[in-house]
Amino acid sequence: MSGFGDAPVFLDVTRLLHRLTRRRMPTGVDRVCLAYVRHFHHRAQAMVIWGGVAVGLSPPASVALFDGLAGWEDGQRVASLEGILGGLLKWPLRAVPAGSWVLNMGHSGLDRRSYLGWLRRKNIRLLVMVHDLIPITHAQFCQAGAAERHVRRMDLILGAAEGIVSNSRHTAEMLDDHARQVGAAVPPVAVIPLGAKKYWTACEAEPGAVAEPYFVMVGTLEPRKNHAFVLHLWQRMLDEWSAAEIPHLLVIGQIGWMCGGVVHRLMTDERLKQRVHLMTDCDDARLGHYLRHARAMLFPSHAEGYGLPLLEAMDLGVPVLASPLPVFREMAGLVPDYLDLGDEDAWLGAIQDYAQPANARREAQLHRLRGFSVPSWSDHFSEFENFVSRL
């Protein structure tokens, strides 16, 4: 295999199987892992951490598993995939051969000392992707213990990885800062932007109608995504604007952590529910439909390592109103309208403008969008293969 020589290549799918068996929808990190599944479909074998032990699947079992995972991404019902997973248990599992390459793109197991011992014992050549350092740099938005676990992941990566893929310059800079703080050297790093989704399946059934104009917010419900801020904006609209002026909002995402107050409001505040609609099980076909008809995507995050939904919206020609994060400017340049999170009136003014038909401000962003090209997965993997060939 080019770049990898004659050594076997294994793709760690532990994270994907864990989330699939919990009946979750793919998140941004999952989408990245699934892109690697598609790219390495017939070029790598699958491996999982099973009971704390790393085991590999045979090539035929790996292809069957990769096919099932592709179906999960495409919106196939989880129940129909469980038969595939059950069938895989009948295939013989085997040890990952010494000297193999292991691609861990989802951070699975990297916080465990046993993983490091296995790498060294088997002389495994580890390639990882670092998605962000948010649990370390913004621990206030994460679950208890997340910072400590992420420090252990970064320590293992810095000490044992053959190479690191970083999704952005911003993430690479955060990794460099962390390495300096802990006195560690950084393995070879390639900054390779993630690809935007290039295909959107059509809805088999007409999705539920949403009164226009409306805006969308896409992402797991968790404090970092700043849903509370947006709900506050809509509460101000309800209090200060006439009913005819208030647009609708689609909150599309799974329930995450530390968001009980936000979820409670979305489920019980009858006045808010007239304008704000929560969708926790929106598949990609419906997501694409709702994005295409939105006045804009709202992305008021406190921190991001990349922000894949932003690029996917832009790829569909959907304007974006975003917080002024360095990584957003790196990815999207001057195309979105960036709004300070401390200026509620600026956000309300932008939403009011974008809700209007043929609004000049929105038309200006649509014009900027026409000159913008989002990264592709084919470009990503071309750069990835070049990186591997240099290791």
Image (tube, grey):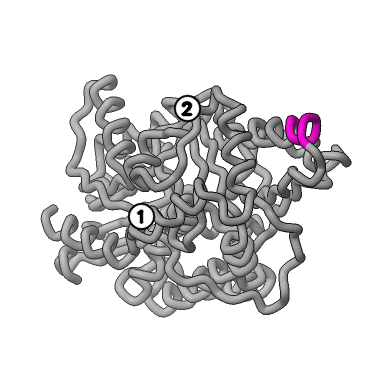
Vertical arrangement, residue 119 with respect to residue 98, above or below: above
Q: Earlier in the sequence, mark 1 or mark 2?
A: 2
- 11 or 61, which is in the foreground? 11
Vertical arrangement, residue 203 with respect to residue 126, above or below: below
Residue displayed at 41% across by 34% down: 325
Please give left or right for residue 120 compared with residue 153 in the image. Answer: left
Q: Secondary structure at mark 1?
A: loop
Residue 210 in which image quadrant: bottom right
- 363 or 221, which is in the foreground? 363
Indicate yes or no whether the magenta region holds residue 238.
Answer: yes
The disc placed on residue 147 is: 2
Locate residue 118, reporting x and y percent. Answer: 33, 47
Residue 174 seen in render: yes
- The region drawn magenta spans 236-241
Q: Which secondary structure type mostly characterizes the magenta part of the structure? A: helix
Label 1 with label 2: CB-CB less than 8 Å: no
Q: Give the alpha-carbon distance from disc 1 to disc 2, as whole Å.
A: 24 Å
Q: Which residue is mark 1?
A: 194
- 102 or 295, which is in the foreground? 295
Residue displayed at 85% across by 38% down: 269
Q: Residues within 10 Å of mark 1 (few under 14, many from 20)?
A: many
Locate residue 166, reporting x and y percent. Answer: 30, 45
The type of residue carrying mark 2 is Ala
Please give left or right for residue 391 compared with residue 45 in the image. Answer: left
Q: Quadrant of the N terminus?
A: bottom left
Please give left or right for residue 307 compared with residue 269 in the image. Answer: left
Residue displayed at 21% across by 44% down: 189
